[in-house]
Amino acid sequence: MTHTKIKELLSTTAVGTEVTVKGWVKTFRNNQFLAINDGSCLSNIQAVVDFENTDESILKRLTTGAAVEVHGTLVESLGKGQRVEVKAKDIIILGDSDPEKFPLQPKKHSLEFLREIAHLRFRTNTFNAVFKVRNCLAFAVHKFFNEKGFVYLHTPIITGSDAEGAGEMFKVTTLDFDNTPRTEDGQVDYSEDFFGKSTNLTVSGQLEGELAAMAFGDIYTFGPTFRAENSNTTRHLAEFWMIEPEMAFYELKDNMDLAEEFLKYLIKYALEHCPEEIEFLRTRLLDEEKSKPQKDRSELDLTQKLQFVLENDFERLTYTEAIDILKQSKPNQKKQFKYLIDSWGADLQSEHERYLVEKHFKKPVILTNYPADIKSFYMRLNEPDAEGRKTVAAMDILFPGIGEIVGGSQREERYDKLIQRMEEMHVPIEEMSWYLDTRRFGSAPHAGFGLGFERLVLFVTGMTNIRDVIPFPRTPKNAEF
Ligand code: 4AD
Ligand code: MG
């Protein structure tokens, strides 16, 4: 090892030993106090520079952002704020950083500004904390499923099917736009395309996941998914990561139980393994909220909010029950909702979801049994209710401040019923014969769900814009870096 990580140095008691630190300069004060960060933790280490015996040319190059290598002795710190520091003997500049040009000055920058320099924002405390938490959660996802014996399945990124049937797909093609091959009737001739057919980026790995669940029993996917929906919101990305478990022999209730256990496991794991980062983000959020009027501030701070989710059962109710609550609700009566709820069958908008979670129940909610008409073709048809209305065994989990974080369902395992739904919803049956084979050969009840990874990271970090929890966000009109 040519150097020791700052995280290790700050927790060591080996005072008096010779050490080498490598990292980036955060600040340099009084020609003496050099704060260095190497990304291993949020804290910097202080190196005390013997300026009288250090070359003037080196001192001048100790600017914010420069990469340095410091050799010296680890000593107890006399200053407050740190236990140990490095008494520098030799300083090498590995990479200069022009202070006139380096955009990250040692001051608070807005998140909007940092988004424009996403290639450098990793070096800020906020993004160090956010992406450490993201990393920690990704690891916890694999740990959770591994402990339960689930098989991690890599589903294709390029696919010919539209899993959600929503048609919000990015095309994948090598055809020449200026000279597109056409069939006799003037359509684009995809037989000339790379795959010999029309293909797109996947919107979900679920359908392929179902195939594997019918062999392994329990599987999960964790990969990028793509949606060309033109939603410029703080909750939507065109490229996001999704975790999709799929379990044979699970019914809707088993599915909900697993999803609730999973979310609690992930939050608990982050609290236990990222205490420094979460504490930083908690304080950051409190600071940010100070500028808001009292009534708009959260009742709970970040840690309390996470604890609250761990300690309380999610509220489970049907879509029909939710509609009754919403109909009676004040914002509906006073016509404050943008979309008023007047009848059963209406799709819930994020304002309705947030009312249920944040105002009515004040905790996470699982909504079940949605109208068949507003959900995907693969969801299992329930017996018609007392009033003869058609619902499916769907479940959405709604979180405070986030809205929908999980979407899932029990799947339609009955061949005839599935075909009927596909016909009604104009899903191309011939192209999906591989999917239908699971229903032809040893079909079995099964269920699964999808967790939007960035929405989870949003919740756990207390950030408010989804663009700030993925390193390089892809949104309408933006694919920088
Ligand atoms: O509800 P969705 O569309 O469900 C599916 O894709 C199913 N195939 C899942 C399954 O049953 N296996 O998406 C699942 C979750 C949503 O609840 C949300 O958290 C997230 O994915 N999500 C998005 N996150 C960021 N940006 C977007 N544009 C998202 N669209 C969905
Ligand atoms: Mg959904």
Image (cartoon, rainbow, N blue to C red):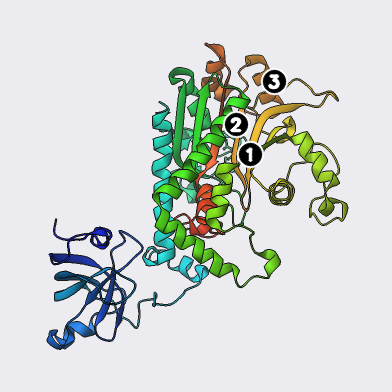
Depth-wise, is mark 3 or mark 2 nearer the camera?
2
| Residue type marked 1 | Phe
Please state which of the two labelled residues, at mark 3 or mark 1, is closer to the viewer. Answer: 1
Quarter that holds the N terminus: bottom left
Q: Residue at x 52, y 40 (%)?
A: 264
Vertical comparison of 32 with 74: above or below: below
Q: Position of residue 266 (x, y in %)?
A: 47, 42
Q: Are marks 3 and 2 in contact (CB under 8 Å)?
A: no
- Alpha carbon distance from label 2 to label 1: 10 Å
Q: Amino acid at mark 2?
A: Met
Label 3 lies in ligand 1 vicinity (Cβ under 8 Å): no
**Which sits in the foreground, 395 or 86?**
86
In this view of the protein, can residue 433 be seen by the observer?
A: yes
Q: Give neighbour class at mark 3: few <14, some 14-19, many 20+ (Cα, 10 Å).
A: few
Determine whether label 2 and label 1 are within 8 Å by CB.
yes
Q: Nearer the viewer, residue 145 or 294?
A: 294
The label number, if any, that marks residue 314 in the structure image: 1
Residue 381 lies in what quarter of the image? top right
**CA gap, disc 3 to disc 1?**
34 Å
Q: Earlier in the sequence, mark 3 or mark 2?
A: 2
Foreground residue among 478 and 261? 261
Q: On residue 18, which mark appears?
A: none
Q: Position of residue 301 (x, y in %)?
A: 57, 59
Visible residue check, residue 172: no
How far across and down, in percent of the image, does residue 109 sit?
A: 47, 73
For residue 420, which numbered disc appears in the image? 3
In the rendered view, does 109 fall on the left or right side of 38? Answer: right
Q: CA distance from mark 3 to mark 2?
A: 26 Å
Left or right? Give the position of 203 relative to 15. right
The residue tagged 2 is 256
- Tell me the kind of residue under disc 3: Gln
